[in-house]
Amino acid sequence: MKELKTLNKYFLKYSRHLGWGILFVTISNLFGIFPAQLTRNALDVVAGNIDTYRLFNGFGLQNDFYKLLTFNIFLFGILVLSMALLKGIFMFLMRQTIIVMSRHIEYDMKNEIYAHYQKLGLSFYTSNNTGDLMNRISEDVGRVRMYVGPAIMYTINLIVMFLLVIWAMVSVNARLAFYVLLPLPIMSFMVYNVHDKINKRSEAVQAKLSDLSTFVQETFSGIRVLKAYVREKQFLKAYSIQSSDYRDLSMNLVKVNALFMPSMLLLVGLSTILTIYVGSIEVMNGRLTVGNIAEFVLYVTMLTWPVASLGWVVTIVQRAAASQERINEFLKIQPDIVGGNYAPERLKGEIILQNVTVKYPQSGTVALNNVSFSVKPGQSLGVIGRTGSGKTTLVNVLLRLLDPSEGNVVLDGKNLKDFDLGVLRDRTGCVPQDVFLFSDTIKGNIAFGLKSKMDLSKVEQAAKDADVYDNIAEFPMGFNTIVGERGITLSGGQKQRISIARAIIKQPDILVFDDCLSAVDTLTEEHILSNLRRIMKDRTTVLISHRVATVKNADHIIVLDEGSIAEDGNHQELMAKRGLYASLFEMQLLEEIS
Ligand SMILES: Nc1ncnc2c1ncn2[C@@H]1O[C@H](COP(=O)(O)OP(=O)(O)OP(=O)(O)O)[C@@H](O)[C@H]1O
Ligand SMILES: [Mg+2]
């Protein structure tokens, strides 16, 4: 339960809601008790006067007496109704304070978790799957909300009502009170057990449902592969096996659910019978009035639901504690990459790598091995290497998405770790290797790179520079075309170029291209690169590719091989070396001709 202490700060923040809530609960319960006492009085009035009424049999006065009696009963009725109305109003206010508080807390928690997620580095995202991250922020927060809202509300209600009702009962007749209260703990324990079962079974149902939706989702995203390999029948079979499991689990749940209400009602009935039985004996012994029995029956019904809810509240609290523990686990993780204080307006763009080595802890792969090079401000650097040679790792190091295990990165004469992360990444434009477009318009996707307001002329210019303007203009909706769930309406090359436009629209001081021209033809590539030379004049550019054609005009080229620099120099120098670079060049030239 200590995990739930984390939530106390929220109770403090919303203590006003909570305070009012407790007051409203108390008042609404008072209005629940008065009607029981009124009913007792009404019945006693009837029971006490019925004999007098009979005495007047045959007299004209009987009619007047009858009128008086019924008027009295009518008044009681009106009173009971107004009490119910008042109780309703205060119950409304109780929900308006406590449940509203829980929604506020839910909102705060979701924001806190989301903000924390964004602070965490890439290693966090590679070691946790997306489903888990989603669950923390939706399902677990939802369960915690059940604790800070309904559970707290029912507990306060239970305590207040118990104190009031027991006090009222004992002040009438302690013996009867004892008998009436007897079955309640049993009921509470039973409800706890049943709820526990219901929870376990519904969790199993939920888990199966999530399996089922993952399966269906994968089928739809991979529909092209599925159809091409004619696997519809197998998938249908796999699906029906999964969904029949789901059905069986649901049936299991329905069984417990169906038993719940009848057994509750049975216990309530038993309590009522006990009350009437013991009450009647007390009446016969002259220690109670008939009205008292009615009053007690009303108390029993009043107590039933809160007592039943006790078992339910216990399960809610247990689940909330488990959820909060999972949330706390995530919140405790500290970001492994923290920025410094140095926040210059602009970057000059001098990059120096000193003996940088990167080893991925999960796999032990040494992705970069003792890499050193320097790029002068305004120069362009080409990086070429075969697949898996460490190029993307180098990009991650430059953007500080990853810290080197050994060695230093020096930018503009300062250690990269001294830079404010926001400034560093804001002034660096990066086009990642795997394109990601948001489900938004093309315009929105390109303007994502802008910090300021949307500026259509800038968007269009960026699209022209990335050589994708003509393609976009051909779409019926132009720049307002919505990119499908994962950009399915665009070709690979179009997506890459939109991703390039997004990076150049922000006019960064350093531009990093991670193999992002792989899906465009050589002619388009030429266009883009010559546009880039104009845009990136006097700014540093890092061009990464596995194609010689992309990097050959760079001022300086390094050739990566299994994480180490195998060769470096400009195109002519490297060709003269007749090493790896030259062989790559010849191979790719051959490929293009053939
Ligand atoms: N998150 C990671 N965890 C463990 N190993 C990784 C991780 N990312 C990359 N690697 C490994 O590091 C090596 C270099 O990967 P990297 O992505 O830098 O290559 P690359 O040169 O960009 O390749 P490509 O041209 O295919 O994009 C590879 O052996 C890869 O398996
Ligand atoms: Mg790569």
Image (tube, rainbow, N blue to C red):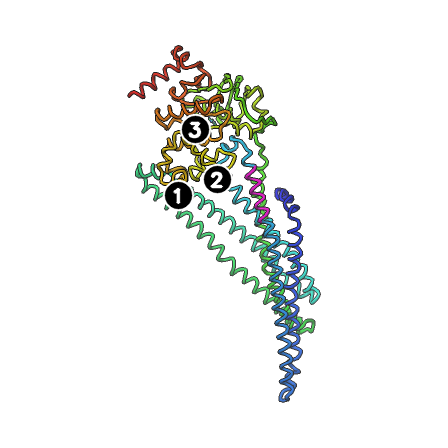
Percent of width and height locating residue 41: 66, 72
The residue closer to the viewer here, 339 or 479, is 479
Q: Is residue 563 left or right of residue 336?
A: left
- Within 8 Å: ligand 2 and the Cβ of disc 3? yes
The three-letter amino acid code for the residue at tag 1 is Val
What range of the chain is rendered magenta? 103-115
Of 521 and 251, which appears nearest the observer? 521
Whole-percent x and y of residue 201?
49, 49
Q: Residues within 10 Å of mark 3 (few under 14, many from 20)?
A: some
Specify the principal SS of the magenta part.
Answer: helix
User: Which residue in the rendered view is the most extreme toward the top?
Assistant: 576
Observer able to see residue 243: yes
Front-most of 240 and 67? 67
Q: Are marks 3 and 2 in contact (CB under 8 Å)?
A: no
Task: Give the Cα separation between the discs numbered 3 and 2.
Answer: 24 Å
Residue under label 3: 433
Is 112 magenta? The answer is yes
Cα distance between the residues tagged 3 and 1: 28 Å
Q: Would you name the residue on which mark 1 appears?
A: 216
Dot 2 falls on a residue whose secondary structure is: helix
Q: Earlier in the sequence, mark 3 or mark 1?
A: 1
Going by the numbered disc 2, the residue's amino acid type is: Gly
- Quadrant hosting residue 476: top left
Where does label 2 land, which residue? Answer: 131
The answer to whether residue 559 is above or below residue 71 is above
Q: Relative to residue 143, is residue 81 depicted above or below?
A: below
Tag 2 and tag 1, C-beta contact below 8 Å: no
